[in-house]
Image (cartoon, rainbow, N blue to C red):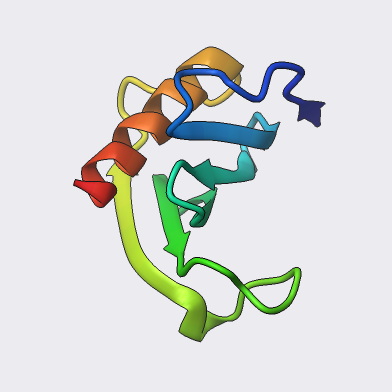
Amino acid sequence: MTVVEDWQLVCSEFRIEEIWTGAFASGFGEVGDGRSFSFHIQQQKLVVDIYRPRLVGPVPQDEDVVATASRHLFAIDIADERSLTAAVRDVVSDLIR
């Protein structure tokens, strides 16, 4: 596990708070408008879920998911934090447009 030291990785609109790399890569962060997101690897795909703003509890429930997208792991080095971060950022930016 790596706790991202600089939460402002890309811009003020997107930040990853925690990221785990490797075969079971996962993590979570925030989009600039107050929504949070999580990501994980499932069946050779990177899956990203965006949750509604102002969640009541610390753990989002299924009904809190407002958008989901996936991307094949082709050309993503899931062992490299920078590659994984870039892939997550791309998927999140597609979801919030």
Tell me if 94 is positioned left or right of 56 in this view. Answer: left
Q: Residue at x 50, y 25 (%)?
A: 85
- Locate residue 94, reporting x and y percent: 22, 42
Residue closer to the observer: 80 or 56: 56
Which residue corresponds to the image point at 43% horizontal and 59% vertical from the top-left? 50
Give coordinates of residue 91: x percent, y percent.
Answer: 31, 40
Left or right: residue 18 versus residue 29 is right
Depth check, front residue: 94 or 13: 13
At horizontal 34% and vertical 62% (from top left) the residue drawn is 68
Depth order, front residue of 31/49: 31
Q: Quadrant of residue 25?
A: top right
User: In the rendered view, would you say 64 is above or below 89?
Assistant: below
Tell me if residue 30 can be seen: yes
Give the vertical position of 75 relative to 39 (above or below): above
Count the labels in the image: 0
At 49% from the left and 57% from the top, the residue drawn is 35
Image quarter where the N terminus lies is: top right
Q: Position of residue 89 (x, y in %)?
A: 39, 31
Q: Is residue 77 visible?
A: no
* Vertical arrangement, residue 12 with respect to residue 60, above or below: above
**Most extreme residue toward the left, as rendered?**
97
Q: Nearer the viewer, residue 55 or 62?
A: 55
